[in-house]
């Protein structure tokens, strides 16, 4: 079944476009926020397709960047390798080599190098919001200055 991504605006409305007849309909989707993000849609023309609702406020870029991370409570000596799977201006998703007992609310220090022309080094503190096996997702809680914010912003646009 065909699938497309639909971005949800601040009013929790999604603009759904039928790939068969090109009709467009604005649909309220607030009842799906926080739970179901993939919808099966049947257009008035009879075509059936899927849409993935994207409630994110910021662009998230898929990556495969090597990095290091450690729980703030364990200290730098407990640093372990990780793979940065995705990055946004305000958050990060990473894959650990093995489960480490991370819990929602834990603070991590994450450091990695962007694969941009300047090979920009990034080091940020994040708070864990989501854990699934060895995948850890979270939001940045401290910023190291305007330069790094611009570097990540530029990186996300290219």
Image: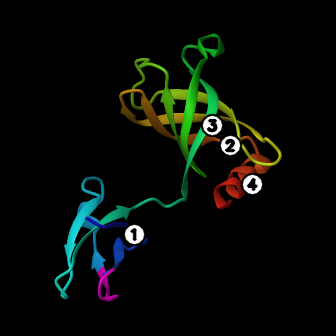
Q: How many marks?
A: 4
Query: Residue 65: which disc?
Result: 3
Query: Residue 150: which disc?
Result: 4
- In the rendered image, residue 123, in percent from the top left (x then y), is placed at 69, 34
The stretch in magenta equals 19-26
Q: Residues within 10 Å of mark 1 (few under 14, many from 20)?
A: many
Q: Please name which of the two marks, 1 or 2, marks the residue nearer to the observer.
A: 1
Q: Please name which of the two marks, 2 or 3, marks the residue nearer to the observer.
A: 3
Q: Is residue 33 above or below residue 73?
A: below
- In the rendered image, residue 148, in percent from the top left (x then y), is placed at 75, 46
Is 22 within the magenta? yes
Query: Residue 143: which disc?
Result: 2
Q: Please name which of the two marks, 3 or 1, marks the residue nearer to the observer.
A: 3
Q: Secondary structure at mark 3?
A: strand
C-alpha gap between disc 3 and disc 1: 28 Å
Q: Which residue is mark 1?
A: 8
Q: Is residue 33 above or below residue 15?
A: above
Q: Please name which of the two marks, 4 or 3, marks the residue nearer to the observer.
A: 3
Pick out the residue farthest to the right.
Answer: 118
Q: Secondary structure at mark 4?
A: helix
């Amino acid at each position: 079944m065909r699938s497309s991504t639909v971005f949800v605006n601040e009013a929790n409305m999604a603009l759904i476009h039928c790939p068969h007849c090109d009709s467009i309909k604005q649909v309220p989707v607030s009842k799906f926020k926080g739970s179901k993000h993939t919808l099966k849609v049947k257009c008035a023309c009879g075509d059936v397709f899927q849409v993935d609702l994207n409630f994110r406020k910021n662009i998230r870029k898929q990556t495969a960047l090597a990095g290091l991370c450690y729980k703030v409570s364990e200290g730098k000596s407990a640093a372990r390798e990780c793979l940065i799977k995705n990055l946004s201006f305000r958050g990060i998703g990473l894959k650990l080599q093995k489960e480490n007992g991370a819990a929602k609310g834990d603070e991590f220090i994450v450091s990695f190098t962007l694969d941009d022309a300047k090979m920009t080094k990034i080091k940020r503190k994040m708070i864990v919001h989501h854990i699934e096996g060895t995948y850890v997702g979270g939001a940045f809680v401290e910023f190291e200055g305007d330069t790094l914010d611009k570097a990540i912003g530029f990186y996300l646009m290219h």
